[in-house]
Image (tube, rainbow, N blue to C red):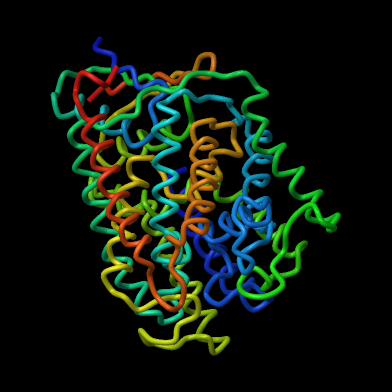
Amino acid sequence: MKKKNLILVVVTGLALGAAGVGLMLLGNPGNMGFCIACFIRDTAGALKLHTAAVVQYARPEIIGLILGAFLISLVTKEFKPRGGSSPLTRFMLGFFVMISALVFLGCPLRMVLRMAAGDLNAWVGLIGFIVGVFVGVQFLKKGYSLGRTYKKNVLEGLTMPAIQVVLLIALIAGGVLLAVSAEGPGSMQAPIWIAFLLALVIGVIAQRSRICQMGGFRDLIMLKDPHLFWGGLAIFVAALIFNLAAGKFTLSFADQPIAHTEWLWNLLPMVGVGFGSVLLGGCPMRQLVLSGTGNIDSTITLFGFLVGAAFSHNFSLASSAAGSTPGGRIATIVSLLVMLIIGFAYSRKSANA
Amino acid sequence: MKTVDARGLSCPEPVFLAKKAMDAGEYPFAVLVDDTTPLENIKRFANQNKQTIKVYEADGEYTITFEK
């Protein structure tokens, strides 16, 4: 049982690493074969929540991941509509985690894919991410908790999977309903069906294995338990091998695809992503997977991601290859402050009912 | 028997509560969870700490008793 779980988490990691490079070779943007933050941002663009013309596309990878987790949770009877654990706070955390991720230019998943392609800026991000998780763990030790979840009506749990089905239909139908970039990262797309089906399979195994990169470092730091960490390492190893084989490995700070070289603004936003993910109980990918299994708290977090992504581009907070923006730097600091406030507010022992 | 109610809490809180009870040393004690993720995590945690546990399931809720 124990060994089977470990194999599953490693297989999930290997699949993610392979898919990350594979989908890039099939047309997705550079070192962005699979990225939760970037792809939610692209989806926000497709829904015209922001109008940055270069990052609009309803990514089938997001749809597949959620639906894969949904389908397997029905099979294993783990589909359980539940929620009510400080929803607004979760929304805000999702909002600020997304804004931070877009200043760095990637979620923990893309961070590892970038690291495995030789992008040294991502290694700086990793340091920030680990620091962020470490800070978050200190709050967990002080008794941080967003409170209990409760059983909900089945319709609540079905809402997010249903939205994904509608998105998938709109995507396949084409037409004018969804915006699509004509140029830039949003126009770089792996074939819909390959991306969708691959993500569907990954959604299934990610739900079974509970892979989470934040969880990897958190459990290692807090419980000396490396179980989830092996999954994150597997992503790196698989992506590294595929990048080397495909000639996509270049060790440098400069001229990496969709990355900037300002070390402080690679480091600090990832502190926020790590810290915020601990406060949320899972990194962005884990939230997607959970939202597929009827977890309303994760679904609310997802809406926080979506709105955060829209704000990022509507207010020029997101970085580009040219570097971070003044607004993005301020937003990074604000994000950290908000997370600190939330961390302290929910750490009072008496708050843990 | 002392019972730790970890229902509705998301990981790592249930594991942390189990660890707290374990550190307090008041055996036997039980941890109550209502999801498979904390169940698996607590099982793994118990395994690593060489604890003897028993799991009872009823109505989608799990009672994990730590014997020693």
Above or below, comparing residue B38 to residue A189 in the picture: above
Above or below, comparing residue A97 to residue B10 in the picture: below
Above or below, comparing residue A319 to residue A179 in the picture: below
Going by the image, does A21 lie left or right of A90?
right
Q: Nearer the viewer, residue A15 or B68?
A: A15
- Residue A174: image location, x then y, percent: 83, 58
Tell me what residue is drawn at x 56 percent, y 44 percent: A289
Q: Nearer the viewer, residue A166 or A328?
A: A328
* Quarter of the image that includes the N terminus of chain B: top left
Tell me what residue is drawn at x 72 percent, y 72 percent: A182
Tell me what residue is drawn at x 81 percent, y 49 percent: A169
Q: Nearer the viewer, residue A178 or A252?
A: A178
Above or below, comparing residue A114 to residue A100 in the picture: below
Tell me what residue is drawn at x 37 percent, y 19 percent: B32
Q: Quadrant of residue A190?
A: bottom right
* Quarter of the image that includes the C terminus of chain B: top left
How many numbered callouts?
0
- Residue A323: image location, x then y, percent: 39, 75
Going by the image, does A80 lie left or right of A143?
right
- Residue A253: image location, x then y, percent: 35, 84
- Residue A320: image location, x then y, percent: 46, 72
Going by the image, does A77 lie left or right of A340?
right
Q: Nearer the viewer, residue A72 or A160?
A: A160
Of all residues, the one furthest to the top in this rendering is B1
